[in-house]
Image (cartoon, helix red, strand yellow):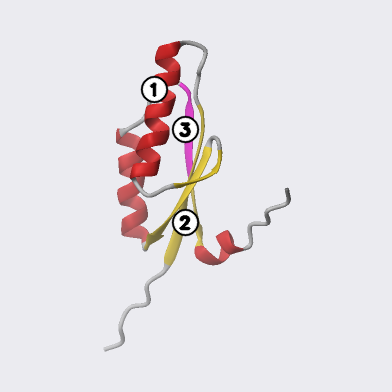
Amino acid sequence: MEAEEVRFMWLMVFFDLPTKTKPQRRRANRFREFLKKDGFMMLQLSAYARVCRGQDAVDKHVRRVRSSLPKEGSVRTLQVTDKQYGRMELML
């Protein structure tokens, strides 16, 4: 029996959160801190990514993000393969 090949995936989180009031800034910072503690690395101020070992891990981290959503703003996730992520070009 062959060992099943592990497929590494990248989970990206993009968000736009309100920061006009002190409580809004606090919630936005709390969400960023959650992402960092969950293993995400910052790509840009409101774009984070982490590598996951297979679809089950992606699903687990999507659930974690969903359970930590701030009460207002826009948050979205995108999963891509390791090969697709590797084709990202840093331009500036």
Which is nearer the N-term, disc 1 or disc 3? 1
Mark 1 vs mark 2, CA separation in Å = 25 Å
Q: Which residues are magenta?
A: 73-77
Residue type highlighted by circle 1? Arg
User: Quick one: SS at disc 2?
Assistant: strand
Identify the residue at image location x=38%, y=25%.
70
Looking at the image, residue 54 lies above or below residue 29: below
At which x and y percent is residue 69? 36, 30
Mark 1 vs mark 3, CA separation in Å = 13 Å
Magenta residues, dominant SS class: strand
- Residue 62 falls in image quadrant: top left
Q: Judge depth for marks 1 and 2 and give the one in front.
A: 1
Residue 67 painted magenta: no
Disc 3 to disc 2: CB gap under 8 Å = no
Q: Which residue matches tag 2?
A: 10
Looking at the image, residue 23 lies above or below residue 53: above
User: Quick one: SS at disc 1?
Assistant: helix
Q: Which residue matches tag 1?
A: 27
Instruction: Name, please, the residue furthest toward the left.
Output: 1
Q: Residues within 10 Å of mark 1 (few under 14, many from 20)?
A: some
Residue 74 painted magenta: yes
Identify the residue at image location x=39%, y=43%.
36
**Front-most of 4 and 88?**
88
Q: Which residue matches tag 3?
A: 75
Quadrant, the N terminus: bottom left
Residue type highlighted by circle 2? Trp
Identify the residue at image location x=45%, y=19%.
25
